[in-house]
Amino acid sequence: MPGKLLVFEGVEGCGKSTQLTLLQGMLLQNSSLQQLQRRGLIPHVLATREPGGTELGLGLRELLLGYRGEAAMASRAELLLYAADRAQHVEALIKPALAEGCWVLCDRFIDSTVAYQGYGRGLDLGLIDQLNQVATGGLVPDLTLWLKLDASVGLARTHQRGAADRMEQADLAFHQRVQGGFEALARQHPQRIVAIDAAQSVAAVAAEIYAVVDRYLQQWYAPSLTA
């Protein structure tokens, strides 16, 4: 049985990376998942990210988030670099893991490109959809956990962490457009995007995410869990 791709999405500072790590640990204690692992149906729960989920991706991540050249990075160049990172990520890591039955927890995926480069940068949404199709070979997340948070709150959180990367340094208006992009995507894809209130405490957000994922796990593997 193919594995599942679970993606964490949201604006800067929404807590994606923290919550992904917490969910990975909590899943290891899930009795249903343990049962499936003993039967070899879910060999591993892997954590990864975009950009930077592969060796090639690490170099692209440095360009995308750390570029400090005199000339600003063109929006289309940024879009293509993200697409290149995703294409390598899908082929080298995600698809092989899913083929083995693994769960893949990914920090950002196709929706981030739509929100950031489409709504944020104003690039053509049709072009972005085409590039996402090329980069993923049609792969779509089984579940997207959208950590819903006001962009201004998220940026305030990132500033508390210290040095900001290239994306975090963009102005509030840009991040508000990105926030609007995620809101639009949630309306368009209610079958796979679940909104999580990321303004809660870290523990409360983790508990809400765990409850959602456990519900989906029971649905996806119902025949195997009752056999």
Image (cartoon, rainbow, N blue to C red):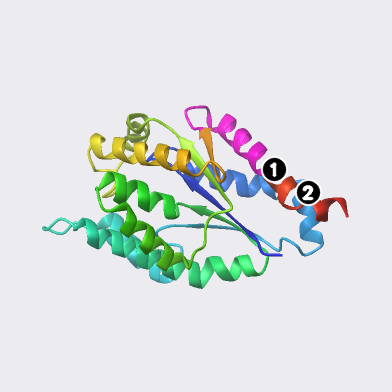
Can residue 54 be seen from the camera position used here? no
Q: Is residue 172 left or right of residue 6?
A: left
Please give the range of residues in magenta: 197-214
Q: Position of residue 20 (x, y in %)?
A: 54, 47
Question: Which residue has dot 2 on it?
Answer: 32
Q: Position of residue 189 (x, y in %)?
A: 50, 44
Q: Position of residue 62 (x, y in %)?
A: 31, 61
Q: Nearer the viewer, residue 124 or 20?
A: 124
Q: Is residue 148 left or right of residue 75?
A: right
SS for callout 2:
helix
Q: Quadrant of the C terminus?
A: bottom right
Q: Is residue 127 left or right of residue 201?
A: left
Q: Earlier in the sequence, mark 1 or mark 2?
A: 2
Can residue 24 be seen from the camera position used here? yes
Q: Nearer the viewer, residue 68 or 114?
A: 114
Which residue shows up at 49% across the image and 72% down it? 91
Which residue shows up at 57% across the image and 44% down it? 191
Question: Which residue has dot 1 on it?
Answer: 214
Residues marked 1 and 2 touching at CB (< 8 Å): yes
Which residue shows up at 23% across the image and 60% down it? 76
Residue placed furthest toward the left: 70
Q: CA distance from mark 1 to mark 2?
A: 9 Å
Please rate how many residues cluster around mark 2, counting C-alpha atoms within 10 Å: few if below 14, some from 14 to 19, many from 20: some
Q: Is residue 214 above or below residue 57?
A: above
Q: Residue 66 is drawn in which quadrant?
A: bottom left
The amino acid sitting under disc 1 is Asp
Q: Nearer the viewer, residue 42 or 176?
A: 176
